[in-house]
Image (tube, helix red, strand yellow):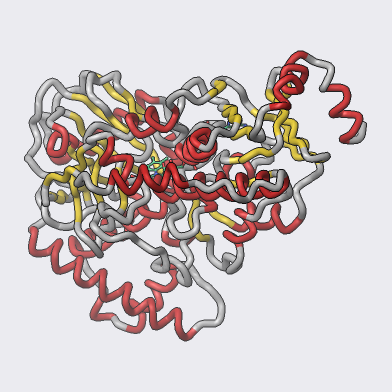
Amino acid sequence: MDSNQLFNTHFRDGTIASRVERQNRPLPSVIVIGAGISGLAAARSLYDESFEVTVLESRDRLGGRIHTDFSFGCPVDMGASWLHGVCNENPLAPLIRGLGLSLYRTSGDNSVLYDHDLESYMLFNIDGKQVPQQMVIEVGDTFKKILEETGKVRDELAEDISVSQAISVVLDRHPELRQQGLAHEVLQWFICRMEAWFAADADMISLKTWDQEHVLSGGHGLMVQGYDPVIKALAKDIDIRLNHRVKKISSGYNKVMVTVEDGRNFVADAAIITVPIGILKANLIEFEPKLPDWKVSAISDLGVGNENKIALRFDKVFWPNVELLGTVAPTSYSCGYFLNLHKATGHPVLVYMVAGRFAYDLEKQSDEAAVNFVMQQLKKMFPNAPKPVQYLVSRWGTDPNSLGCYSYDLVGKPIDVYDKLRAPLGNLFFGGEAVSLDNQGSVHGAYSAGVMAAENCETYLLEKQGRVEKLRLASVRHEMLETLIPLQISRM
Ligand SMILES: Cc1cc2nc3c(=O)[nH]c(=O)nc-3n(C[C@H](O)[C@H](O)[C@H](O)COP(=O)(O)OP(=O)(O)OC[C@H]3O[C@@H](n4cnc5c(N)ncnc54)[C@H](O)[C@@H]3O)c2cc1C
């Protein structure tokens, strides 16, 4: 059946008929696929401009890779939890300020541990002995030097190599930077933290681009009340259909038809696709006509990492009042760390965080086995640690709604991969963290990508209607007013 016949057939069913009745409405209709922050930002933008918007979401909840769980009696973010860039330039700042949400800053600018600095931490070795703070600071300085030296390796090479290959080259050239014994294990811990930032092992991270991200100023802050209020605010009043898994997107004849799992169709003038890059890589959505080869290549050329969290709630706090508790080991794979949520939020909760291959390996285990493993790590530091009262285990790598945690640059990534990913195809627009201009893999990047996709979609549709004069003055005025309210930050 060609696209024309397809549309004629479906125009006879109830859904399409009701759309036809609404054709006299002044502004066009858009389907947004995915109710994560990017999809909701896109939908909010269009809704506020009086477009007719429907959001189709496969899960039974909003937020996607933002998931604030309340089963502990307090907010625990099992997906994103930091605002990266606690500053007015952060595109999410107006919303966070407007909602009166507080942030707990865990690091300033340019921290060697990305979203943590070495202000409030304790590291332990495998025997439960605390690593001297001075050693952690000195190895941190050495790690910085090693990374600086990898910059020289990069300048010498035409081809891209991985960060771990580059570190090996540097250590061969500068044996004085090699660490022995406990100091070696601490160096591995720093590498483990770097891998957590990319959610990928160092042998997968591109030397060419690892430090090219435009990181916003102001350091990194935990969302004390969780990200949930942001999601709820964006979603307010919008027509969102949960449990609507999109299986097919057909575009043509100035319309888009989106088919969900149970066979129902939704038709609109345009669609914005914000599903995770993992879903596109796995071809879980059929496109008609097929996506062009350049788009397919861009999708496969981008990496998608994995990160998981195991959150433990205890009766009471038995650990020291520091933000980060880490265990060092001979390889970065075996190093680990707990985020102490008590420090930031006052609740007796520790969150163990794992990334890269280890995150996938942990997903092969049952929740109970994963928690047992984490408790073994905790008991290395605190042999009398009691059993947790409750626990939560994330599985972002195998969850069929995410298939990974966020995108990162693979070794040898083509320069134009992001341009190709975000390029629209007629009335199909692409949002999501992976198409962000500068901040892939982040909440604020995903948010901006959603807003940008909505603006492009809006311009496209209004131009088609010959209504380019319609400006977005309302939202600009709204944001200007909100900048008058300061961000609420603790640990300044
Ligand atoms: C463990 C973890 C920790 C993180 N930590 C941070 C952090 O601290 N700070 C930070 O800035 N970022 C962090 N991130 C990254 C951040 O969460 C993401 O970049 C961002 O939330 C992505 O938003 P999105 O809207 O692009 O995608 P998503 O939130 O994944 O939204 C896409 C939506 O599409 C839906 N969907 C999938 N398939 C279909 C389908 N076939 N039909 C319909 N709907 C579908 C999904 O269910 C989902 O709701 C973290 C991510 C993870 C997983």
Can see residue 325? no
- Quadrant of the rendered structure where residue 182 is? bottom left
State the residue at coordinates (61%, 22%): 244
Q: Could you say where residue 158 lies in the image, as x and y percent from the top left?
A: 55, 82
Q: Nearer the viewer, residue 153 or 488?
A: 488
State the residue at coordinates (33%, 35%): 227
State the residue at coordinates (26%, 76%): 145
Is residue 271 positioned above or below 18 on the image? below
Q: Nearer the viewer, residue 475 or 409?
A: 475
Find the residue positioned furthest to the front: 469
Q: Could you say where residue 443 lies in the image, as x and y percent from the top left?
A: 40, 45
With 352 as the anchor, is 346 left or right in this view? left
Q: Could you say where residue 161 lies in the image, as x and y percent from the top left?
A: 50, 71
Q: Nearer the viewer, residue 377 or 399?
A: 399
Is residue 130 positioned above or below 63 on the image? below
With 57 as the anchor, is 185 left or right in this view? left
Find the residue positioned furthest to the top: 14
With 190 as the anchor, is 125 left or right in this view? left
Q: Could you say where residue 27 lies in the image, as x and y percent from the top left?
A: 64, 34
Can see residue 2? yes
**How many numbered marks does the figure carry?**
0
State the residue at coordinates (12%, 34%): 383
Q: Which image quarter holds the N terminus?
A: top right
